[in-house]
Image (cartoon, rainbow, N blue to C red):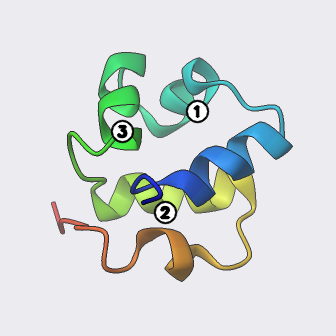
Amino acid sequence: MKDKYHQLKTAMFARRVTQGALAQEVGITEQALNAKLNGRGDFYIREAEKIIAFLELENPSNIFFDQGLRGA
């Protein structure tokens, strides 16, 4: 089974964006981002919005919906 955010990791790789750079853009620690990418936490909606904009994701619903987004 694919991990929870496989498509997001693929988008990061394709755009040569490191976890450190994305974490800084989102405003969280690299450790927190790593935990979320590996299914040990969920992205808040504001975090997902920043990721979508920064990575210019065309189909973010494929990545984030049904993945446990929280509204805080």
Viewer-nearest residue: 35 or 58: 35
Q: Earlier in the sequence, mark 1 or mark 3?
A: 1
Q: Earlier in the sequence, mark 2 or mark 1?
A: 1
**Residue at the image position 60 percent from the left and 62 percent from the top:** 52
- Does residue 64 sit above or below 12 in this rendering? below
Q: Is residue 61 left or right of residue 10?
A: left
Distance CA(mark 3)–CA(mark 2): 19 Å
- Mark 3 Cα shell of 10 Å, populated few (<14), some (14-19), many (≥20): some
Viewer-nearest residue: 19 or 45: 19
Amino acid, disc 3: Asn
- Mark 2 Cα shell of 10 Å, populated few (<14), some (14-19), many (≥20): some
Residue 59 rendering spot, x and y as whole percentages: 66, 79
Mark 3 lies on residue: 38
**Residue at the image position 39 percent from the left and 52 percent from the top:** 47
- Mark 1 Cα shell of 10 Å, populated few (<14), some (14-19), many (≥20): some
Q: Earlier in the sequence, mark 3 or mark 2?
A: 3
**Residue at the image position 28 percent from the left and 45 percent from the top:** 39
Amino acid, disc 2: Glu
Which label is found at residue 49?
2
- Does residue 23 sit above or below 48 in this rendering? above
**Residue at the image position 41 percent from the left and 32 percent from the top:** 27
Distance CA(mark 1)–CA(mark 3): 15 Å
Which label is found at residue 22?
1
Image quadrant in which the N terminus is located: bottom left
| Quarter assignment of residue 66 | bottom left
Distance CA(mark 2)–CA(mark 1): 12 Å
Q: Count the numbered circles shown.
A: 3
